[in-house]
């Protein structure tokens, strides 16, 4: 069995391809190193980034202190929720500054407003106390009517309808 040997031309082509791929890898590596150097320089020099990281650390520290004493606080404590929210926003700000991207601005608050309106409408429809309160606000308070009859409550008539029948007759004059 004879092994095929490569010709000089094939070896030159392979050598050129190896040089080209090494050159491309070198360029990629130098770009990555430059990007990391920029990130480290940004981390050292940027005061806003320092503030964001400090806020993140403080928020995480206070949230951990509250949760470590009472683990159920992570679900119920509003202060823990606000600290976690503050820490999350600081983390996102720091990430954006490290990447060099500006922070995203919130677009309109109509979704929240819509949710509040729909939620309150559902509450008014389903809860009778809220419904009466809303009707009183819109149309005014409801008047209380007294349905009592002027005669005594113990006296009933012969016909049973609760009204006293008159027993005296008046003479009819025929002139």
Image: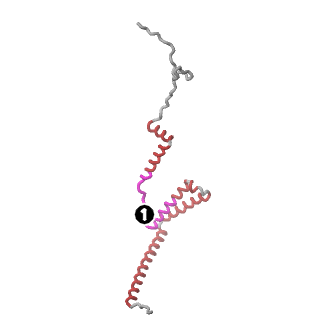
* Residue depicted at x 51% and y 58%: 85
**In the picture shown, does residue 104 fall above or below 2?**
above
Where does label 1 land, which residue?
Answer: 102
Colouring convention used in this rendered image of the protein: secondary structure
Measured as percent of width and height from the top left, residue 21 is found at 41, 81
**In the picture shown, does residue 2 fall above or below 65?**
below
Q: Secondary structure at mark 1?
A: loop
In the picture, the quarter occupied by the C terminus is: top left
Measured as percent of width and height from the top left, residue 110 is found at 42, 52
- Furthest residue toward left: 9
The stretch of residues the image draws in magenta is: 86-113
- Furthest residue toward bottom: 2
Crowd around label 1: few <14 · some 14–19 · many ≥20 (10 Å): few
* Residue depicted at x 41% and y 54%: 108
* Residue depicted at x 57% and y 22%: 154
* Residue depicted at x 45% and y 48%: 118
- Please state which of residues 87 and 55 is positioned toward the viewer in this rendering: 87
| Image quarter of residue 3 | bottom left
Measured as percent of width and height from the top left, residue 153 is found at 55, 23
- Please state which of residues 156 and 26 is positioned toward the viewer in this rendering: 156
- Please state which of residues 160 and 90 is positioned toward the viewer in this rendering: 160
| Image quarter of residue 75 | bottom right
Measured as percent of width and height from the top left, residue 133 is found at 49, 39
**In the picture shown, does residue 120 fall above or below 68?**
above
Number of numbered discs present?
1
Residue 54 magenta-drawn?
no
Instruction: Examine the residues drawn in magenta and state their main secondary structure.
Output: helix
- Furthest residue toward top: 175
In the picture, the quarter occupied by the N terminus is: bottom left
């Amino acid at each position: 069995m004879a092994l095929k040997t490569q010709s000089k031309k094939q070896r030159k082509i392979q050598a050129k391809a190896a040089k080209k791929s090494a050159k491309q890898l070198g360029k990629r590596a130098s770009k990555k190193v430059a990007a990391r150097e920029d990130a480290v320089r940004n981390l050292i020099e940027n005061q806003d980034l320092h503030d964001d990281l400090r806020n993140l650390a403080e928020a995480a520290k206070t949230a951990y202190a509250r949760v470590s004493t009472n683990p159920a606080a992570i679900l119920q404590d509003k202060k823990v929720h606000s600290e976690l929210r503050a820490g999350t926003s600081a983390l996102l700000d720091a990430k954006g500054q490290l990447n060099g991207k500006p922070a995203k601005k919130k677009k309109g608050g109509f979704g929240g407003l819509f949710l509040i309106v729909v939620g309150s409408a559902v509450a008014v429809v389903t809860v009778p106390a809220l419904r009466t309160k809303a009707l009183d606000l819109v149309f005014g308070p409801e008047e209380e009517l007294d349905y009592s009859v002027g005669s005594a409550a113990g006296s009933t008539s012969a016909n049973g309808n609760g009204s006293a029948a008159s027993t005296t007759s008046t003479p009819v004059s025929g002139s």
